[in-house]
Image (spheres, rainbow, N blue to C red):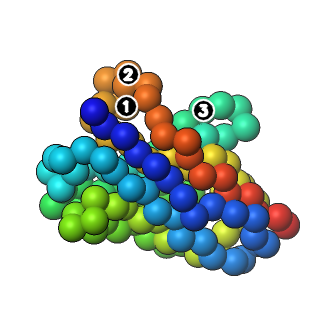
Amino acid sequence: QIQFVESGGGLVQAGESLTLSCAASFSTFRFTAIGWYRRTPGDQREMVAGISREGTITYADSVKDRFTISRDNTKNETYLQMNDLKPEDSGLYFCNVPRLVRAGYDRWGPGTQVTVSA
């Protein structure tokens, strides 16, 4: 069963940084692409960054050049380094498997809240 636990969120001021962590519990983690998602006040989940099993990385335009996604397959963890945070980056952040999300998978971890004040 695929499970994620996200951590590292907090309340920061614009321009500051945070690093989010996502711990995965399934044994095939190292073979699986992982994405970081943000749930906005409108209750939409958008993928802000993704990393394939080979390390190929994609970013949403809104976070490009400010966020960095990485993974540690020895720890079954994925990270999201967030620099130069903006108020519009605020939201509940989750990680999940993009292939499953696109297919309608709707099980999510608790998420971690990021709030950026102006």
Residue 53 place in picture, x, y as percent: 18, 56
Judged from the image, the secondary structure of the residue bearing numbered disc 3 is: loop
Which residue, given by chain and number where applicable, does mark 3 sit on?
A: 44
Q: Quick check: 39 above or below 118?
A: above
Residue closest to the eye, 65 or 1: 1
- Residue name at image x 31 percent, y 24 percent: 103
Q: Quick check: 66 above or below 28?
A: below
Which of pointers 2 and 3 lies earlier in the amino acid sequence? 3
Q: Amino acid at mark 1?
A: Val
Which residue, given by chain and number where applicable, does mark 1 sit on?
A: 101
The reply to whether the C-beta atoms of the residues labelled 1 and 3 are less than 8 Å apart is no
- Quarter of the image with the N terminus is top left
The reply to whether the C-beta atoms of the residues labelled 2 and 1 are less than 8 Å apart is yes
Residue 100 place in picture, x, y as percent: 30, 31
Q: Amino acid at mark 3?
A: Gln
- Residue name at image x 46 percent, y 62 percent: 21
Dot label at residue 104: 2
The reply to whether the C-beta atoms of the residues labelled 2 and 3 are less than 8 Å apart is no
Q: CA distance from mark 2 to mark 3?
A: 14 Å
Q: Is residue 81 left or right of residue 87?
A: left
Dot label at residue 77: none
Regarding residue 57, the answer to whether it shows in the image is: no
Q: Amino acid at mark 2?
A: Gly
Residue 34 place in picture, x, y as percent: 32, 50
